[in-house]
């Protein structure tokens, strides 16, 4: 029988990712700040944890999929979490956070006898349900080898190893999300210009995404925008992730004029 995995964070993405673990035969012990969000998984056989620490087990594996630096750090600092995970446990952080936060968290785990692996997710909830996620990950080699099968079980169609230096995978995630936001805003602007001039946005996007921009994400976002569907990035996520990207770049002295402009755009009413 597969081991029981702790899972913390059952939002729009966390719930289907956790559900994939149940489908793969893993036991699941789940916690979410809003208790009712665990109900569907509990009905399928998951155990409900009363606290984040209750989701962890000595030497076990716990996954977190939360909102930002503060939310992940709050869970790690919560009463008993690190004590319960040690000795030898692994925390897989799948949240979009800064490399700086990842490094702090890794140090906290190491000091208390457990290991931190970062494995942020590229993919929307429907991609998780279809097992079409892309996952970069980084951390100590032995811990990565241990958790690698779990990443497949959680819905990865591709896993990319960025070595042992913590922060590398979260940097990939921040850059990727910055590029997605820039791409979606550019397509939206182009589509509006085509329509305003009386031409066919759908035909335009079909041609461009079959030739110069032949990539799945251009096609999916382009079709959604060209047909008038809600843009996939219309949520609080772009502002949050652009802010994380800018903060990370600023710490290294890298200029961010494009993300700065995008941040002003997404904040506009």
Image: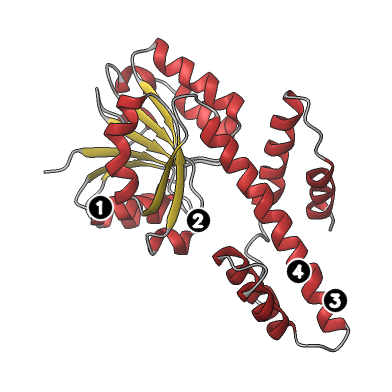
Camera-near label (1 vs 2) is: 2
Spot occupied by residue 150 in the image (x, y as percentages of width and height): 30, 43
Q: Earlier in the sequence, mark 2 or mark 4?
A: 2
Name the residue at the right extreme: 197
- State the quadrant of the C terminus: bottom right
Pointer 4: residues within 10 angstroms few (<14), some, or many (20+)?
A: some
Camera-near label (1 vs 3) is: 3
Say which residue label 2 marks.
Answer: 123
Say which residue label 3 marks.
Answer: 193
Q: How far apart are marks 1 and 3 (CA)?
A: 46 Å
- State the quadrant of the N terminus: top left
Spot occupied by residue 136 in the image (x, y as percentages of width and height): 47, 42
- Disc 3 is placed on an element classified as helix
Q: Which of marks 4 and 1 is nearer the N terminus?
A: 1
Say which residue label 4 marks.
Answer: 188
Residue toward you, 114 or 49: 114
- Position of 167 with respect to 134 (left or right) is right
Q: Can residue 1 be seen in this view?
A: yes
Say which residue label 1 marks.
Answer: 22
> Can you say whether 228 is above or below 122 in the image?
below
Name the residue at the front extreme: 211
Camera-near label (4 vs 1) is: 4
> Residue at coordinates 28% horizontally, 52% vertically from top-left?
42
Q: Which of marks 4 and 3 is nearer the N terminus?
A: 4
């Amino acid at each position: 029988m597969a081991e029981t995995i702790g899972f913390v964070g059952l939002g729009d993405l966390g719930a289907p990712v956790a559900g994939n673990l149940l489908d793969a035969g893993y036991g699941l012990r789940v916690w979410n700040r809003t208790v009712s969000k665990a109900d569907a998984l509990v009905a399928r056989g998951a155990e409900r944890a009363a606290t984040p620490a209750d989701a962890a087990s000595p030497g076990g594996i716990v996954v977190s999929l939360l909102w930002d630096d503060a939310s992940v750090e709050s869970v790690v600092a919560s009463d008993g979490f690190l004590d319960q995970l040690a000795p030898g446990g692994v925390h897989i952080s799948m949240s979009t956070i800064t490399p700086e936060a990842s490094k702090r968290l890794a140090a906290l785990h190491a000091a208390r006898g457990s290991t931190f692996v970062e494995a942020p997710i590229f993919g929307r909830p429907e991609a998780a349900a279809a097992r079409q996620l892309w996952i970069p990950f980084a951390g100590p080699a032995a811990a990565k080898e241990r958790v690698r099968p779990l990443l497949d079980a959680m819905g990865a169609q591709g896993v990319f190893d960025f070595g042992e230096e913590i922060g590398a995978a979260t940097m990939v995630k921040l850059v990727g999300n910055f590029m997605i936001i820039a791409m979606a805003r550019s397509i939206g602007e182009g589509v509006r210009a085509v329509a305003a001039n009386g031409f066919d946005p759908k035909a335009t996007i079909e041609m461009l995404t079959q030739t110069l921009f032949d990539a799945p994400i251009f096609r999916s976002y382009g079709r959604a925008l060209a047909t008038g569907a809600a843009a996939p990035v219309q949520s609080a996520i772009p502002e949050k992730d652009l802010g994380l990207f800018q903060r990370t770049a600023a710490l290294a002295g890298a200029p961010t004029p494009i993300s700065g402009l995008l941040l002003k755009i997404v904040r506009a009413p």
